Amino acid sequence: MSNKSLAIIATKGTLDWGYPPFILASTAAALDYDVQIFFTFYGLQLLKKEMKLEVSPLGNPGMPMPMGMDKWFPVLGTAIPGMQSIMTMMMKAKMKKKGVASLPELRELCLEAEVKMIACQMTVDLFDMPTNDFIDNVEYGGAATFFEFAGESDICLYI
């Protein structure tokens, strides 16, 4: 490797956890890093042609709630049926209002910048995920495939 390199393991498949790997990867690629992202377990949701990701307020005490809800709305209330969809809708609206790129846009930016995206073959097999559900330009491999790159990388992140 002649350039600096960044290796990322993406394990989460929610709207809010989809941003870090793509933002970091696209930024590093723009700074001329060689970048690979290894998507495993729920992180594979980020490689689907149609990303139907939601944000979950459950178990996320650091999430800023709209209208000061974190001050008056009980945490247990986030478990009310439909709350996840409402929070997702509110998060997407806020991102759009603030001009934040969508996950598909960020993913496309990564692909254009030649970020290598590897889907964990073991997880694909474990969950019987059809590969035609995934975008093109995805490679399939196991942990050893990731370590070939990550073992030599300058930066390695687990997200």
Image: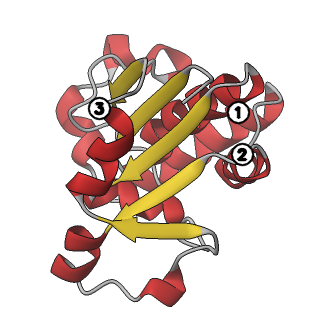
Does the image show residue 11? no
Cα–Cα gap, marks 3 and 2: 31 Å
Location of mark 1 (residue): 95
- Residue type, label 3: Gly
Answer above or below: position of 49 versus 11: below
Q: Position of residue 31 (x, y in %)?
A: 73, 19
Dot 2 falls on a residue whose secondary structure is loop
**Could you say whether the residue bearing mark 3 is in a helix, strand or loop?**
loop
* Mark 3 vs 1, N-terminal side: 1
- Foreground mark, 2 or 1? 2
Identify the amino acid type marked 2: Ser
In the displayed structure image, the side of residue 118 where residue 3 appears, left or right? right
First of labels 2, 1 by sequence position: 1
Q: Would residue 119 appear left or right of 145 to someone viewing this image?
A: right
Q: Position of residue 121 (x, y in %)?
A: 28, 72
Residue named by callout 3: 151
Whether pointer 3 and pointer 2 mark residues with C-beta atoms closer than 8 Å, the reply is: no
Instruction: Judge whether 49 appears above or below 58 on screen.
Output: below
As drawn, 136 above or below 4: below
> In the displayed image of the protein, which residue is found farthest to the front?
2
Q: Which residue is mark 2?
A: 102
Q: As drawn, is 72 to the left or to the right of 75?
A: right
